[in-house]
């Protein structure tokens, strides 16, 4: 009887356990299947309207005014390198490159010195004791001696205004200063240059 009671107790205990129905195989709770979202309509990229290239007539190069202006001194001849310092009494050739503002910077030639709009060059040499010497083009109204006139040298490789009458008339360890004024068609340039005499 005890054995029957024990079996009934085991059956009762087994019946008392809650029974679970088999769970369907669902994905975890944090996963949500994606819903169908129709693709967004994107506007086509905005591009500037194409315009046919227009041919414009080439503009005439303007030669109104000065382009490059450069002053240099060369010992003995125009073909020697520029001098920064020389011995006392060294003969010098002054070279001034004067170009137009036009495309390619063509040189301003001697034919363009006449009249009010021509090129005007004036070089003032100031010695260490304040002594002055003047050089310039033909249209400078001053007491410039004929040998101190600048003339245009059209030689290829030079094409500049030159004068070969400069001399380093100064003592040892002194300086000669030059003030260069160039005027053309209303434009004016002022340059300074120092030559050391050693």
Image: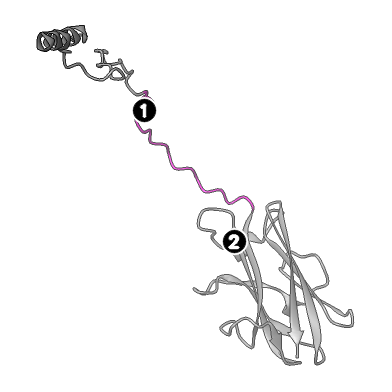
Q: Nearer the viewer, residue 41 or 137?
A: 41
Quarter of image, res 191 = bottom right
Indicate the quadrant containing the C terminus: top left, top right, bottom left or bottom right: bottom right
Q: Which residue is mark 2?
A: 99
Q: Residue at x 56, y 48 (%)?
A: 62
Q: Where residue 166 appears, x then y in whole percent?
A: 72, 83
- Tell me the tag on residue 1: none
**Above or below — where is 49 with respect to 140?**
above
Q: Which residue is mark 1?
A: 51
Asked whether residue 59 is drawn in magenta, I would say yes
Q: Where residue 9 appears, x then y in whole percent?
A: 17, 9
Q: How many marks?
A: 2
Q: Nearer the viewer, residue 195 or 35?
A: 35
Indicate the quadrant containing the N terminus: top left, top right, bottom left or bottom right: top left
**Above or below — where is 55 with respect to 50?**
below
Residue bounds of the magenta highlight: 46-65
Q: Where residue 158 appears, x then y in whole percent?
A: 55, 74
Asked whether residue 125 is drawn in magenta, I would say no
Secondary structure at numbered mark 1 = loop
Horizontal arrangement in the rendering, residue 102 relative to residue 132 (left or right): left
Mark 1 or mark 2, earlier in chain: 1
Q: Where residue 48 appears, x then y in whole percent?
A: 39, 26
Q: Residue at x 86, y 82 (%)?
A: 128
Q: Residue at x 54, y 60 (%)?
A: 106
Horizontal arrangement in the rendering, residue 105 relative to residue 2 (left or right): right
Q: Residue at x 59, y 70 (%)?
A: 160
């Amino acid at each position: 009887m005890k054995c029957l009671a024990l079996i009934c107790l085991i059956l009762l205990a087994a019946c008392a356990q809650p029974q679970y129905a088999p769970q369907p195989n669902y994905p975890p709770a944090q996963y949500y299947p994606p819903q169908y979202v129709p693709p967004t309509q994107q506007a086509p990229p905005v591009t500037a309207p194409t315009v046919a290239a227009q041919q414009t007539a080439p503009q005439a190069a303007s030669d109104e005014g000065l382009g490059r202006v450069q002053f240099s001194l060369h010992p003995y001849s125009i073909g020697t390198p520029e001098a920064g310092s020389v011995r006392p009494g060294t003969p010098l050739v002054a070279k001034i490159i004067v170009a137009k503002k036009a495309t390619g910077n063509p040189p301003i030639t001697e034919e363009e010195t006449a009249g009010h709009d021509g090129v005007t060059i004036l070089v003032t040499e100031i010695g260490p004791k304040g002594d002055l010497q003047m050089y310039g083009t033909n249209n400078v109204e001053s007491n410039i001696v004929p040998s101190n006139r600048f003339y245009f040298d059209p030689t290829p490789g030079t094409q500049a205004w030159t004068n070969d009458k400069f001399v380093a008339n100064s003592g040892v360890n002194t300086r000669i200063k030059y003030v260069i004024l160039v005027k053309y068609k209303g434009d004016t340039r002022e340059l300074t240059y120092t030559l050391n005499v050693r």
